[in-house]
Amino acid sequence: MSSALGLAVITPENIDAALALRVRPDQEHLVAPVATSLAEAYAYGEAAWPRLILDGDRPVGFVMAFFDLTFYPDRPGDLPRSGLWRLLIDAERQRGGYGRFAVERVCAEIRRRGGGSATVTYHPGPDGPAGFYAGLGFRPTGETSGGQTVAALELPPLS
């Protein structure tokens, strides 16, 4: 991992690189492909925040956040939340700190927008990312969403 990490808006110039990102075959059941994420981002408009993760000029992953959105209109008691919607690090680039970087940037954007916590959902089980998110401070809330574990992280206020 270089010191030139960044997030980039998806554009006509980098969309093919974003669509080419793939997790390992044994992880495909854990995260939707970038194409699905971009379709969801289109459908949800301003609530979605898709970004390409770059190491210098090299695409290494994809992250998508959501801001103050209740995803399930059939559950009117849901509180608006902000958090991590999708995280995909290319199979060749995993374990390089890119996921941590992306989650930290999402949390910083949530704080910038006035949010005090971040949520994430993930597939439970031994092959899922529970340990990764726990290592970043996310704690299960006891809720599930679509069969996935919901976890939250309280964010420190901006100083």
Image (tube, rainbow, N blue to C red):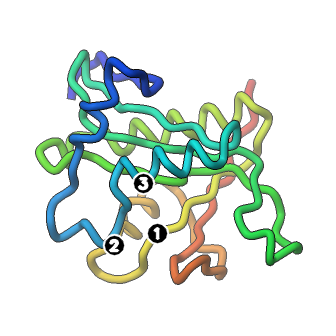
User: Residue furthest toward the right?
Assistant: 77
Q: Which marked residue is nearer to the observer: mark 2 or mark 3?
A: 3
- Give 101 or 148, whichever is nearer the viewer: 148
Q: Which mark is residue 122?
A: 1
Q: Which mark is residue 128?
A: 2
Asked if residue 76 lies left or right of residue 151, the reply is right
> How many numbered marks, from 0 up?
3
- Amino acid carrying label 1: it is Tyr
Question: At numbered mark 2, what does the secondary structure look like: helix, strand or loop?
Answer: loop
Q: Residue at x 75, y 36 (%)?
A: 157
Q: Quadrant of residue 3?
A: top left
Say which quadrant the C terminus sits in: top right
Measuring from the top left, give residue 153's x and y in whole percent: 62, 56
Q: Residue at x 29, y 81 (%)?
A: 126
- Amino acid carrying label 2: it is Gly
Mark 2 Cα shell of 10 Å, populated few (<14), some (14-19), many (≥20): some
Q: Which mark is residue 36?
A: 3
Q: CA distance from mark 2 to mark 1?
A: 7 Å
If you read the primary sequence from the N terminus, does the residue marked by circle 2 or circle 1 appear first? 1
If you read the primary sequence from the N terminus, does the residue marked by circle 2 or circle 3 appear first? 3
Q: Which marked residue is nearer to the observer: mark 3 or mark 1?
A: 3
CB contact under 8 Å: marks 2 and 1: yes
